[in-house]
Image (cartoon, helix red, strand yellow):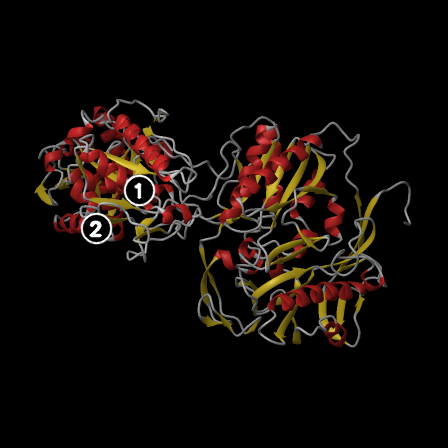
Amino acid sequence: MSGNGDFVGLRRQIHEVESTDFGDRTALDGGRLTVSEAEAKECFKHPALASVGLSWARPGESVRIVKVLDAVEPRTKGPGGGGIFPGQLGPAVPQGEGETHVLKGVAVLTAGWLPRAQQGLVQMSGPSAELSPFGLTHNLVVEFEPSSDDHWLEVAQALRKGALRLAALVASAGLQAEPDRTDELARISGKGGPDLPRVGTIVNLQTQGDFKDVYVYGKSMTGSLPTAIDPNELEDGAVVSGQYGHPGLKNPTYLHQNSPVVAALRARDGIDLSFAGVILSPEPVDQSIKELASAHAARLCYQMGWDAAIVSKEGGGNADSDIALKVDALEAMGIVGVGMFPEMSGANGLGPPVVSPPATATAMISTGNYDERIDLEAVERALGGETYELTGSDSVAGMRVPTAVIYSGLSPVGWGRLTCADPVEAP
Amino acid sequence: MKIVHYVNQFFAGLGGEEQAGVGPQSRPAAVGPGRKLDSLLGDDHQIVATVFCGDDYAASKDTAAAEIVALIKEAGAEMVVAGPAFTSGRYGIACGRVAAAAHNAGLSALAIMHAENPGVAEAAPAQVVASGLTAREMGKSLQTAAEAIAKIAAGEKLTAADGLVGSAPRINRLVEKDAATRAVDLALARLGGDRQATEIPMPDFGIVHPAQPIDDPSEALIAILTEGGLVPTGNPGRLESARATKWLRYPLADVQELAKYDYQSIHGGFSTAAANDDPHRILPLDVARELVEEGAIGRLYGEYFVTTGNGTTVADGARYGVEWAAELHKAGVQAAILTAT
Amino acid sequence: MGAPRVVPTRGIPYPAGDPTLRPEEEKAWRRLLLETALKAVSTTVHKPTVFTPATI
């Protein structure tokens, strides 16, 4: 490791991307990114995929992307990826140290039909664009044709690995370029540190089987107990999404690489809190295992000396109880638990906001009401499919939809600025 | 402003429970508590008519609110004021539904009842201001109503200070900080000792006032009910397995026992194997019949009511409870045993 | 949730039974639940009150 002083952690080399296009080679020159279409398509060579199509969807363009499956930020640690997305592109060895090149402002998006997937959309222009993280990024959109209709799980896997490979390929353009800035992200330590409250985050990952699973170092957390992980491991893609339900409540790979809660805690680290780390937990299907995982997560926080934990989820009403049980378990141990809830208050906003609220831990953040209807203006071009089955209309048409379909629009990991409440100010 | 006042049979001076089944009727000018309200309103506003209806009729008949609003319009209303209903469930539901229907018909509408009355949830999009718990607080409740009416007539917005109750609608808006940053702020506020800070208030499930006990079960008409999703096999009424939007009634009069394969539970919140193997595990008809034969129970009500208690909203649950109570009351049932899953 | 008179039973999927018992035992248990419920509706209460079936 080339280091100055005794810094232990990850150096994030940030390359700001201003414009994007296809070109003869994959390269980054003064904020201008070109991607070789031929190289990009190579990433998806797999018997399960008959063909893929690539397009750019850029901020402000009159484009809608429908049936969005996952989004990945281009990152690499060296030629061939250098260990990025461990357990997916390479062996499951711990990452989160050394250097990682990041192409900021770009995302690789996969879009199309998969079983159990619910149809999320991203609008690139108009007032709805800023409701999704990907209404604001240059998106390299991957559409696909399966080889047959019999092997959807293989299609999903080929698509997922292909998108990760493509993200690493695109990021390789940054290896030769001078970064715009370098962030030094220290490894989390439980020792020493200033006399400030220790605050961390518990990230619940959906574990509901094929097409509804999230991978940690390449494996589902189904059957696992909660575990502590260094936030820098998230930066290097240790958590990858294979979960395609609940578009508005979805945590794509991009938001694990760029965890908003980790960013918010880092921004305050050493100022009014001490960033205490990240715990990953499954969201078990069975109630008694939910309770076990929640009690265990609270004990981990207690052992690590946390004073407060921010708890996030993925999924609908069932996953509300994964937050509720955890914040209640934390509260019982004298640790402040804050739950982040997308509200389900009905189209008129008069229904109860949370299906399964906590019993004692009453600190809750609203990420918006997912039932509220919004109007999307018609667009010139659509990617991901010609028809949008939810409304039964042409994908380019003007439509009235619940906020719940905006991809990551009510981000349970806290990306968005939607709420139904007056924010609470810090003391 | 021309106001039509809505009250129940009791406050219209017709009588108590024995008159709870009467349908909607209209009288010119103010009646009962309306007279006091009319005097509090001064010269600017006037109660031009009083429309009233029996509690059972209003709470259990689907078309009741529409019939009542038709009479209200006929009387030339510009505004409808319903109540005060205090904590009376059926009356509160009726006031809430009348206010909602009037609002939707383009009239200005206000309901008055206690904040924990299940009728509050029925009133939206019309507004509700708080009354006291019982009619002993009539004077104060009418004062609140009169002030709210004056404000509405002046085109002003009601606030909690005016006694406005019911949850404010949860409406999306964009704020400056992302949710993650606000979550950190909230954690620090809590660590700083603010134990109330939150963006989502805890749901308030309200209070239920216990009914008087019955004198002697061996003389009583008793009903058995369930929220365990038990329906005749095939689910002819299409009861939902979760988030039920309705309740159903099925006959028991000629049913000696609930035979396996004749009934099934469609509840989506638990394994229904045990229930389907013996439906009496959900609805204890076999033992209830024995107790009737032995004289421990006077008579068994000839129907059972069923819904699915699985992800059902509290507002819906409270409404089913009030509707069941109205139905059973009308049928002379004195006690009900409800199995809860 | 504030129900004024409550008789606790043994499991969510079988509020009026207990599949672990033999059939005649289960019916006796159901009978006891109902007798307890009749006692509950004949008793004055002022707040939510639990009536525990007196085991025989």
Of the image marks 2 and 1, the number of the one nearer the N terminus = 2
| Mark pair 2, 1: CA separation | 27 Å
For this view, does B113 lie left or right of residue A382?
left
- Marker count (numbered): 2
The reply to whether residue A317 is visible in this rendering is: yes
Disc ID at residue B309:
none
Q: Residue shown at 33%/44% (left/top)?
A: B316
Q: Position of residue B237 (x, y in %)?
A: 28, 56
Question: What is the chain letter for disc 2?
Answer: B
Q: From the viewer's perspective, is residue B102 above or below residue C25? A: below
In the rendered image, residue A127, in percent from the top left (x then y), is placed at: 53, 59
Q: Is residue B168 left or right of residue B194?
A: left
Tag 2: amino acid: Asp
For residue A91, above or below residue A5: below
Graded by Cα atoms within 10 Å as few (under 14), some (14 to 19) or many (20 or more), the crowding at tag 2 reads few
Quadrant of the image occupied by residue A27:
bottom right
Q: Which mark is nearer the camera, 2 or 1? A: 1
Q: For this view, does B22 lie left or right of residue A119?
A: left
Q: Toward the viewer: A30 or B72? A: B72
In this rendering, does residue B84 appear at all?
A: no
Q: Position of residue B55 (x, y in %)?
A: 17, 39
Q: Residue at x 30, y 22 (%)?
A: C46
| Residue hosting label 1 | B283
Chain where mark 1 sits: B
When the figure is inspected, residue A372 is found, relative to residue B44, above or below; the finding is below
Q: Which residue is mark 2?
A: B62
Helix, strand or loop at mark 1: loop
Assign the C terminus of chain A to one quadrant of the image.
top right
